[in-house]
Amino acid sequence: MTATPDLATPRLASPDLLRAVFRRHAAGVAVITARGAAGPVGFTATSLTSVSAEPPMLSFGIGTGASSWPAIAEADHVGVHILGEHQQELAATFARSGADRFGEPTAWREGPEGVPVLDGVLAWLVCRVHARVPAGDHRIVLAEVAVGDPTGTGRPLLYHQGRFTALRD
């Protein structure tokens, strides 16, 4: 039998409550990229969600204060990269404010629609941006899959309890 939550003293909704709950939620790790006016941009995302099979669509969230937001706000296409457990440092680089995300040792190339495509990932997609939906201090980006490659090898990288981790056998 599982323990019953203490409903007599619930915590009021707050950013801290949301963060505390979602620290308990293991999520896959992706990097979103786009071509910006001043060069490629990208960020680490754990908010990637499959939305529709017909047409094939996905979504992700991005804060409007993020350094990548101006480029994502204007981009017609974005890259979505599913990271493997061997890519913890890459995930950290794309999550770190002020980092040279596309400098050494990041391996990437210009892909379809001029979107930066990262090398060595488990899978990647290039998607056409369909909509940007306001959601508090973020935008939910809906994007339709145009092309991709699901054939990378390895196991997925996860984010849990505030750190990058791997699946256990």
Image (cartoon, rainbow, N blue to C red):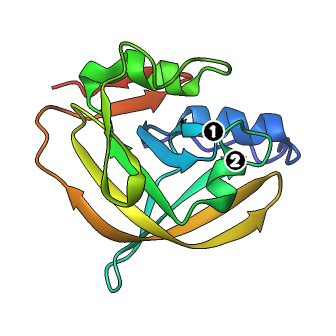
The residue depicted at 43 percent of the width and 43 percent of the height is 1
Amino acid type indicated by mark 1:
Ala
Packing grade of label 2 (10 A; few <14, some 14-19, many >=20) is many
Packing grade of label 1 (10 A; few <14, some 14-19, many >=20) is few
Q: In the rendered view, would you say 89 is above or below 3?
A: above
Residue 49 sits in quarter? bottom left
Q: Which sits in the foreground, 30 or 6?
A: 30
- In the rendering, at what x and y percent does residue 58 appear? 44, 66
Q: In the rendered view, would you say 101 is above or below 83?
A: above
**Split into 4 quadrants, where in the image is the C terminus?**
top left
- In the rendering, at what x and y percent does residue 112 appear? 31, 58
Q: Which sits in the foreground, 91 or 155?
A: 91
- In the rendering, at what x and y percent does residue 125 appear? 31, 56
Question: In the visual, does 18 lie left or right of 1?
Answer: right
From the image, tell me which residue sits under label 1. Answer: 38
Amino acid type indicated by mark 2:
Trp
Q: Secondary structure at mark 1?
A: loop
The residue depicted at 38 percent of the width and 32 percent of the height is 158
Point out the frontmost of discs 1 and 2: 1
From the image, tell me which residue sits under label 2. Answer: 69
Q: In the rendered view, would you say 35 is above or below 166?
A: below
Question: In the visual, does 43 lie left or right of 6?
Answer: left
Question: In the visual, does 104 lie left or right of 92?
Answer: left
Chain-order first, disc 1 or disc 2: 1
Q: In the rendered view, would you say 26 is above or below 53?
A: above
- Cα distance, mark 1 to mark 2? 13 Å
